[in-house]
Structures are given as structure tokens and as C-alpha cells.
Image (cartoon, helix red, strand yellow):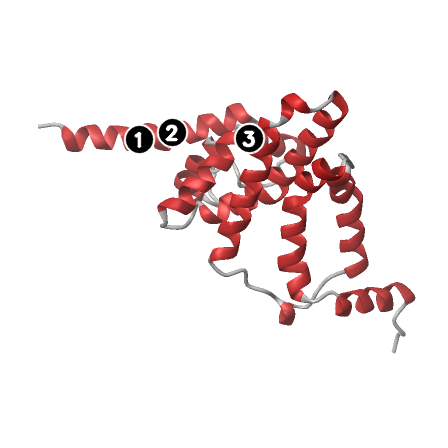
Amino acid sequence: MKAPCFLTLQRHHWSNLLSPIMLHLVLPLSFSLSPLLAWVSGYVALTVLLAAIGLPLLEFMIGPRSAARSFRWGTQFPRLLLIIVIGVCFGLAFAADSMNWTALVALSLSCGYVMGGIGIVLAHELGHRRSLIDRALSRLLLLSIGFGHYAIEHNRGHHRRAATPDDPATARQEEGFGFFCHVTLSVFCAIQFAYQPSKKESSMKHLRLAP
């Protein structure tokens, strides 16, 4: 039987030290508040260093976690977290006039990390809910980062056409990674694919309203 290596033992040690509450509640909450903490403390690069170095290092140290220790966020916490993300980033945007160029660039990158790293994930989850508040928060976040078309393309396009040739988010057989990223991540292509279900829905409404 092969003995576990030192790195495996260290990962197991860190995995046991960090409870699910720490990883799934405290860590996302701290990261969401980090741009505000960076601005208040004066360490404007705090979020960038945390996102680019701290979190990847922590993930490497923890290693894969077993499915038995999975954690469920529930209904209220994602909503609270998205409100915090929007509030912090919008608040810093209103305070931009009082910042120097160094702080402005660092905190802009910080808000980009938070809104892109946690915000889009939360907006995706809340966008699937029936609650008007959750869907409004989702669209507010997506609109603020120039990604508002995602709410239409993903919900009304991707979910209906997943794993078919008509779905831009599904890679074709033997398709290169570069071309797939160009089609999937291109804003022009995404808006074009979002326009199709919107146009179809608008046509259906006109037909229903016609005498």
C-alpha cells in the first residue's frame, strides 16, 4: 500500500481545520466586503492580492473536499451576499471622485474581481428564482457590468438549446478552445443570441394582441 505523501497529509490537515461554515459563509462574506475594507484601511490592493494570490493558495492547500462535507447556502444568504456586493461596489463608485489614481485603479480591479468572481455566480442563481426581488437584484448586477444580455440568453436560450448546435455555450465536437471562447465570451455574439428569443417572444405577444 502506497503511503500518503507530505503534501497530501498537509492538505488533509488544512481541510479538517477549515470548517464548512468558514469556507462557505465567512470566506464569501469577507471577500465581498474586501473592497470596502481595502478603501477604509488604505490597503487598496487588498482584494487584488487576496483574489490573485490568497484564494488560489488556500484552495491549493485545502485540496479536493469530499462530497460528504458539502454545504447548502439556503435561500436568504445568497440574496444578502448579492446585496452586499452591489452595495459595496456601487458605494465605491460614488466615492471615486475622492480617490487618487492609484486607489481608483486598484479598487476598480477589486470591484471587478468581486462582481465577476462572486457577483455573476449569485446573479446566475438568483436569476432562476421566481421572486421579483431576486430577479431584480440579478439583473441589476448584470447590467452594472455590461452583461445584461446574459439574463435573456442564458434563461431563454441556453436552457432550451443546451447540448444542441444552436447553443453557443455548448462546444461542438473537435472544436478548438480559442474559437469556442470567441463565440461564448464575445459580447457581440452573446447579444446576438440574446436578441433571438427576445424577438420571438415579442412576435408572439403581437400575435396574441392582434384582433
Residue to which mark 2 is pinned: 196
Q: Quadrant of residue 1?
A: bottom right
Q: How far from the left and from the top, in percent, is residue 104?
A: 70, 25
**The disc labelled 3 sits on which kind of residue?**
Ile
Residue 204 percent coordinates (x, y): 23, 32
**Disc number lying in front (3 or 1):** 3
Q: Give the quadrant of residue 160.
A: top left
What's the residue at 57%, 42% (across, down)? 85
**Residue 171 seen in render:** no
Q: Are marks 1 and 2 in contact (CB under 8 Å)?
A: yes
Q: Would you name the residue on which mark 1 appears?
A: 200
Q: Which residue is mark 3?
A: 145
What label sits on residue 160 in the rendered view? none
Residue type at the position of mark 2:
Gln
- Reading the chain from its start, which is encountered first: label 3 or label 2? 3
Taking the view exactly as shown, the residue that stands out farthest to the left is 211
Query: Which element is circle 3 on?
Result: loop
What SS does tag 2 mark? helix
Q: Amino acid at mark 1?
A: Lys
Find residue 124 and report its horizontal and vertical position in percent. 50, 45
